[in-house]
Image (cartoon, rainbow, N blue to C red):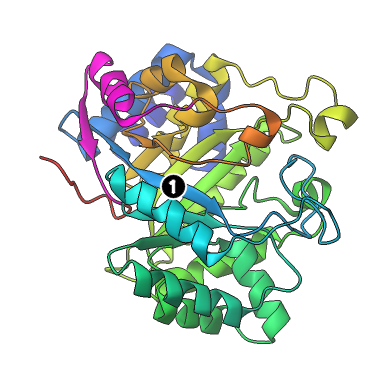
């Protein structure tokens, strides 16, 4: 049996491929072959033609952040005239609009604001849940959890327990970027390490908190970094307790660097082509056999590539996202409404399936 046949057979049998095997596939198989393998794996995991999508709203708690990410133009310092913290009245207006649009979840994220304590977040979550009992809070992320633990002098586990008790429903995979410490120090000098990001997710899984995992690629990383990232995500998932939600999905984001510090330092850095994005979707589906759902980012890649990704292993297109501020700050982002999202999926030959954060189907 040839090396190619052996590796492909292993992939189709849904076995966990090694670093070397994944590198070999990327370097030696063309896009069409990778997509065929990944789509076959996707059909084994999801035999129906359903493609998930959802309605939510991304509300930023604040734009003040000490992380110093070189790819973000949204954040500012506490002293900036642009600095803000979203008020309860503003939340109420935005959430009422979300409910009118048919959604009930907010992706609640913010920067690492030096003045916002864990008590602030506990009170905020309780206030929102008291005002909107059916609201789902998909909020914060491992970097913010780690930041709160450090500020409060308590464990990651304790931070998560307190936030869950206050109303946290699920934890986004935000801030993963590439799980390599050298790259993180370069891109986000004050954000938590790759190891701490992993520890945050491991603790979340112990508490049976639904989570997602992400990768942001197409910047200063190598292909080796990308595959190492996939394997680290897979290893975290392998550690989740039996019956725990763990990572419900893996989401691929291509780096958007227009007008950022990163683009000024490295001109033409964002060179992720359609082919490259689709190869990474396929490789992710093949590598992450212990994560059920692969989501492609319509918001960053556009309609055509999103549709093609559904034949490269992806089975979800994420949210129509009624509000998004970070990508908008760099003048990017493909936005669609519910009608358009359903048409995009239907036109690609699949069944648009409205879901919630736990991937429970909301329409048959």
From the top left corner, tell me how far across and down residue 64 is, in percent: 74, 58
Q: Name the residue beneath numbered marker 1.
A: 57
From the top left corner, tell me how far across and down residue 164 is, in percent: 42, 76
Q: Tell me the SS state at disc 1.
A: strand
Q: Is 242 covered by the magenta stretch?
A: no
Q: Nearer the viewer, residue 274 or 319?
A: 319
Above or below, 210 against 101 in this view is: below
Q: Is 355 covered by the magenta stretch?
A: yes
Quarter holding residue 305 = top left
- Give the side of residue 155 with respect to residue 354, left or right: right
Other-residue count near label 1 (Cα within 10 Å), few / some / many at <14 / 14–19 / ≥20: many
From the top left corner, tell me how far across and down residue 341 is, in percent: 32, 26
- Give the side of residue 26 with respect to residue 317, left or right: right
The residue range painted magenta reads 335-356
Q: Residue at x 49, y 69 (%)?
A: 202
- Give the side of residue 61 with respect to residue 306, left or right: right
Q: Quadrant of the N terminus?
A: top left
Note whether residue 291 is visible: no
Q: Nearer the viewer, residue 316 or 313?
A: 316
What count of labels does the image hold?
A: 1
Above or below, 17 against 331 in this view is: below
Q: Nearer the viewer, residue 43 or 361?
A: 361
* Residue reaching furthest to the left: 364
From the top left corner, tell me how far across and down residue 221 is, in percent: 72, 36
């Amino acid at each position: 049996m040839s090396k190619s046949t052996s590796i492909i057979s292993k992939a189709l049998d849904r076995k966990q491929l090694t670093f070397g095997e994944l590198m070999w596939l990327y370097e030696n198989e063309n896009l069409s072959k990778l997509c065929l393998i990944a789509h076959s794996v996707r059909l084994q995991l999801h035999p129906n033609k359903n493609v998930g999508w959802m309605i939510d709203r991304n509300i930023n708690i604040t734009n003040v952040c000490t992380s110093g990410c070189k790819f973000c133009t949204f954040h500012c310092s506490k002293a900036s005239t642009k600095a803000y913290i979203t008020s309860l009245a503003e939340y109420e207006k935005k959430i009422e609009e979300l409910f009118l649009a048919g959604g009930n979840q907010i992706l609640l994220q913010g920067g690492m604001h030096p003045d916002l304590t864990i008590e602030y977040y506990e009170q905020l979550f309780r206030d929102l849940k008291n005002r909107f009992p059916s609201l789902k809070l998909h909020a914060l992320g491992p970097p913010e959890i780690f930041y709160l633990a450090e500020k409060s002098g308590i464990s990651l586990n304790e931070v998560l327990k307190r936030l869950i008790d206050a109303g946290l429903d699920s934890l986004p995979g935000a801030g993963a970027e590439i799980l390599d410490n050298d790259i993180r120090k370069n891109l986000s000098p004050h954000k938590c390490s790759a190891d701490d990001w992993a520890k945050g997710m491991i603790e979340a899984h112990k508490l049976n908190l639904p989570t997602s995992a992400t990768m942001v690629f197409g910047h200063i990383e190598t292909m080796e970094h990308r595959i190492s990232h996939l394997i680290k995500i897979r290893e975290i998932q392998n550690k989740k307790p039996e019956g725990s939600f763990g990572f419900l999905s893996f989401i691929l984001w291509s780096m958007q660097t227009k007008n950022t510090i990163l683009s000024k330092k490295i001109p033409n850095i964002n060179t992720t082509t359609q082919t490259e994005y689709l190869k990474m979707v396929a490789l992710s589906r093949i590598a992450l056999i212990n994560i059920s759902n692969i989501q492609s980012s319509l918001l960053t890649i556009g309609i055509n590539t999103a549709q093609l990704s559904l034949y490269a292993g992806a089975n979800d297109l994420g949210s129509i996202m009624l509000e998004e501020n970070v990508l908008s700050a760099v003048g990017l982002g493909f936005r669609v409404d519910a009608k358009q999202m359903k048409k995009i999926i239907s036109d690609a030959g699949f069944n648009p399936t409205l879901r919630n954060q736990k991937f429970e189907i909301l329409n048959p």
